[in-house]
Amino acid sequence: MNKQWAAAWMLPLMASWAVAAPVPVEHFFKNPALHEVLLSPSGKRMAMSVPAANGRVGVFTIDLQGNDFPGSRAIVFSDGDVPRFQWVDDERIVFSVTDLQATLGKAYEQAPGLYAVRYDGKDLRYLVEIQGRPFVTGTDRIKSLPWNHMLLHVPAPSEDQSGSAGEEVIVGEMSFVGNELNHLAPMWLNTRTAKTRPLSIARVPCGVRRWWFSAQGEPRAALCVNKGRESLHWYRPAQEGKEAHWTLLAEGPLYQMGLRPQWVGQGDTLYVEHHGGAAGESVVAPFDFSKNAPGATLINAPGFDFEGSLLGDREGKALLGVRLTTDAEQTIWFDAARKAAQEKVDAALPGRVNRIQCRRCGSEDAVILVRSFSDRDPGQLFLWRQADDGGKGRWHRVGKVRPEIQPEQMAGTDLQRIRTRDGRDLPVWITRPAKANQALPAVVLVHGGPWVRGRRWDWQEFPQFLASRGYVVIEPEFRGSDGYGQAHLRAGFKQWGQAMQDDVADALLWAQKEKLASSEACIVGASYGGYSTLMGLIRHPELYRCGSAWVAVTDPFLFLEGSWWVRDDISRTGRRYGLPQMVGDVDKDRDMLLANSPLAQAARIKKPLQLIWGSDDQRVPIQHGKRLREAMQTAGQEPEWIVFEGEAHGVRKTENQVELAKRLEAFLAKHLGPASRP
């Protein structure tokens, strides 16, 4: 803050802080009012996942053919939620079930089952069982598949397909070795009768972990994993006297093959993602089967890995466009009608991400569904019907994702590219209250993973919540983060607590130099972000007044080796082939791991610390927290200790999310302000 301001300016500003009530915590963490909204294949209907009268999220459909928009209830459970679904054809919807009112430890994310139902709620079918929970409604239950089956593919019907013409989907039977997936065996499943039939295919050469299908459901590519290596295979059906067979496209060490299918078309049409950028960024190119290698690059976003999807027509004949995310999401259409529709929407809703679904594009009865969002707005949905108003067309508001959130009260988010102390490029997200015109107390929010991308340009609850409390939020995409090229990702290997931690510190120092952040800061984060919080207090105590670590890795040896006495869900393959190269080898790198172990260095944590855990965490078990807490107590330090019963590696229940946010708010206010705020 500029200390030269006169008292005449200070008093009104202080009064505004005192009078303006902050946005209630509940508004940030309440479940959305709109989850999924999808047009049916023909555009005759629209389906929405929304909260029903009983508080459960169900699916409701709306007939778009008339002028009065009659609605139907497709499915609502009394003890489960359906936030996601897919249209099988114009008549049927397929979906899984979860429990949004349960803690993460009690939810059914690993085996959520599978159901199908008509758009009007008739003909409900229980297709795949939910592990540990029946979720059976009425007398519509028929013989279902066991829980170890998962939905792999919903074939795309043509626009004129309706009725029961497309009632089959492809599911995969999962087989395991220990707790690891060993093979996925695909089969056809009828969503109306629940009958299965074999999927005609030559014997696969190995245990398949992932399949890619054509639009019509032909299996074309398969990813195999065996003894620390992975391989990608291409399937050619029998034709012109040649037997069906598999062709090897690529192979390499686990996590290093670097080739993934992105879109499968008709014949030998395959687009792949590979590391073809200058800094190892992933790009997209057609696969050249004559050279058995990717061809000329189609999509390249320097500084960013490809993240998105290729949008093909329903016959698999051609690409219509590409949807990708750099800092923000954008869609580039090759199809003229869709390109015109996108331009029309972007002109009506400027400065936002506008994701469109278009049916009968360019025709007199075109229907367009738009999900529009920004960094300040969680999202709104609009429907355009070209046939309205005598063919002039009209917009209809479908609804807001979070009606309680007022965009004008939210903070803006920007991506900056800075230089680290050793000269590397470092992406840093800054979320700052819109009317802030001076340096603010900072919260450094470190993402988990760590081998993931931290965030995108959109509305996110925790940064917005923290900014609403008067803080500037700094989110570094430290080396080791995915999404910014292989060079950036691999620069973080075996750098936990070291160069990765320096990146976090450099992001804060840069923000302070730019007068965005004051000298007052705390560091917070979950999972790896929790580990980074602890190491920030150990390595850079001069930068932080406090730290809040959630479900944090505190003991690298327990994380890398596991224990007979501590149950976790880290796979044997990950521990054998992935973690040693990315984090460290417990024998060869023992000294390095000890030097960067929060547990071993617990006596160096002198600043106030908040430790938060879920009692049922299987990724980073609560023993990590208990051991650190005991070590700190032995050293004469007492951290604030918070445990959410039934939660796992994160917090699921809304009331628990609100409680966590309130506890964090009080902790930060105690050590950063509000006395220290402008």
Image: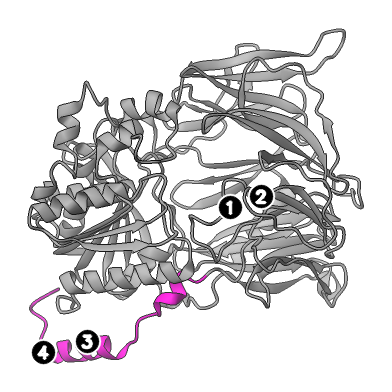
Disc 1 and disc 3 in contact, CB within 8 angstroms = no
Distance from Cα at disc 3 to Cα at disc 4: 10 Å
Viewer can see residue 445: no
Q: Quadrant of the N terminus?
A: bottom left
| Secondary structure beneath label 4 | helix
Q: Specify the label residue 144 is tagged with.
A: none
* Residue that mark 2 sits on: 130
Distance from Cα at disc 1 to Cα at disc 3: 49 Å
What's the magenta region? 1-30
Q: Amino acid at mark 2?
A: Ile
Viewer can see residue 276: yes
* Residue that mark 3 sits on: 13
* Residue that mark 1 sits on: 108
Q: Quadrant of the C terminus?
A: bottom left
Crowdedness near tag 1: few (<14), some (14–19) or many (≥20) residues, C-alpha within 10 Å: many
* Residue that mark 4 sits on: 7
Between discs 1 and 3, the one toward the N terminus: 3
Q: Magenta part mainly helix, strand or loop? A: helix
Instruction: Measuring from the top left, give residue 658's x and y in whole percent.
Output: 40, 71
Depth check, front residue: 24 or 585? 585
Distance from Cα at disc 2 to Cα at disc 4: 65 Å
Query: For this view, does 477 lie left or right of residue 376?
Result: left
